Amino acid sequence: MPRNNKVSIRNTVSFITTRTEENLPFVASILMNVLLWAIIARARKLYDVTVCHFIFMANHLHILIVTDNPEDTKDFVGYIKRESAHLINRLLGRRKKTIWAEGYDDPKILCPSDVVRY
């Protein structure tokens, strides 16, 4: 079944969610958090994205972002998924294994009460 096209709206908050492939867990450690934070910091510099908040959970991640150019959302998420997959594979000694499931969800948050709800 084909996926619906994503709606891109300038200067709105997007609630990005993506999960790991086959529920592969993240290693909960200070080192892993610092490395993942560094990937997000680099992605922020490469793409015109304001990161409001993010959290890496055991098998998925959530990020609240605002983008001026809606096309940056896809590239921003792709960068985070790609670079974190390379990093995790190197740390675990795996070669060319997928970490993230395909795609991501990104509903738009249109009012402040929605931010609290999500």
Image: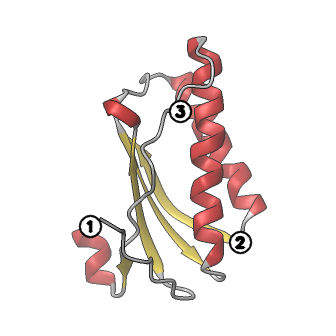
Q: Is label 3 in contact with label 2 (beta carbons under 8 Å)?
A: no
Horizontally, is 97 left or right of 45 in the view? left
Q: Name the kind of residue labelled 3 in the image.
A: Asn
Q: Please tell me whether mark 3 or mark 2 is closer to you in this view.
A: 2
Q: Name the kind of residue labelled 1 in the image.
A: Tyr
Q: Name the kind of residue labelled 2 in the image.
A: Asp
Farthest residue, direction front: 1
Q: Tell me residue 34's x, y (percent).
A: 60, 33
Residue 118: mark: 1
Farthest residue, direction left: 117
SS class of the residue under badge 2? Answer: loop
Q: Tell me residue 83's x, y (percent).
A: 66, 40
Tell me if I can see residue 28 in this picture: yes
Q: How far apart are the alpha carbons under marks 3 and 2?
A: 23 Å
Q: Could you tell which of marks 1 and 2 lies nearer the N-terminus?
A: 2
Residue 33: mark: 3
Q: Is label 1 in contact with label 2 (beta carbons under 8 Å)?
A: no
Q: Could you tell which of marks 3 and 2 lies nearer the N-terminus?
A: 3
Q: Of residues 44 and 84, which is closer to you in this image?
A: 84
Q: Tell me residue 52's x, y (percent).
A: 51, 65
Q: How far apart are the alpha carbons under marks 1 and 2?
A: 23 Å
Horizontally, is 40 left or right of 30 in the view? right
SS class of the residue under badge 1? Answer: loop
Q: Residue at x 44, y 77 (%)?
A: 6
Q: Residue at x 27, y 71 (%)?
A: 116
The residue that label 2 is drawn on is 48
Q: In the picture, residue 38 is in which quadrant?
A: top right
Q: Quadrant of the N terminus?
A: bottom left
